[in-house]
Image (cartoon, helix red, strand yellow):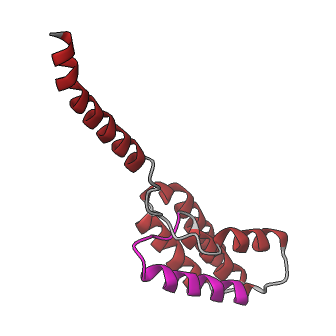
């Protein structure tokens, strides 16, 4: 009787093992990228180190990366618009800086405290 049960159960055990292995392999597949990083880390590093690219070149690189991310499902990462706003501010374009910070706040509500701080300082220093 045990031999008959083993003969009947063996195919079921093999199928269960195959399904478990398939599930494991599918579970290990890399998820799609949620954010389009493009060259953002390099740009921020250059900004912080005051390396060769001028602020205008950095602004243009950011605009190009924003255009590239529009064609994909990936979004720009948190802080992208805030950093762009700082670049505009240092290039003495306060209106563009304000606009970038408002976009950051709209895209990432968790950055409200930080962006409100930046906007408040901008408005305070304008007066």
Who is closer to the viewer here, 59 or 3? 3
In the rendered view, would you say 90 is above or below 20?
A: below
* Residue 74 rendering spot, x and y as whole percentages: 44, 70
Who is closer to the viewer here, 99 or 74? 74
Residue drawn where x is 60% and y is 74% of the image: 38
* Residue 39 rendering spot, x and y as whole percentages: 65, 75
Asked whether residue 127 is in view, the answer is: no
Who is closer to the viewer here, 66 or 98? 66
Residue drawn where x is 78% and y is 73% of the image: 46
Left/right placement of residue 80 relative to residue 110 reads right
Who is closer to the viewer here, 53 or 112? 53
| Residue 121 falls in image quadrant | bottom right
Residue drawn where x is 55% and y is 73% of the image: 81
In the rendered view, would you say 125 is above or below 68?
A: above
| Residue 7 falls in image quadrant | top left
**Magenta portion: prevailing SS class:** helix
* Residue 75 rendering spot, x and y as whole percentages: 45, 70
Q: Quadrant of the C terminus?
A: bottom right
Q: Quadrant of the N terminus?
A: top left
In the rendered view, would you say 13 is above or below 71?
A: above
Residue 53 part of the magenta-drawn span: no
Residue drawn where x is 43% and y is 81% of the image: 70
Asked whether residue 104 is in view, the answer is: yes
Q: Which residues are magenta?
A: 56-77
């Amino acid at each position: 009787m045990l031999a008959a049960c083993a003969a009947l159960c063996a195919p079921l055990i093999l199928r269960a093992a195959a399904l478990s292995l398939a599930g494991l392999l599918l579970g290990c597949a890399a998820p799609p990228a949620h954010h389009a990083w493009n060259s953002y880390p390099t740009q921020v590093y250059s900004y912080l180190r005051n390396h060769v690219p001028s602020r205008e070149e950095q602004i243009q690189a950011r605009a190009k990366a924003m255009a590239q991310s529009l064609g994909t499902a990936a979004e720009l990462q948190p802080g992208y618009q805030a950093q762009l706003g700082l670049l505009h501010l240092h290039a003495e374009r306060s209106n563009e800086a304000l606009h970038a910070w408002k976009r950051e706040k709209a895209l990432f509500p968790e950055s409200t405290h930080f962006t409100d701080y930046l906007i408040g300082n901008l408005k305070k220093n304008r007066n």
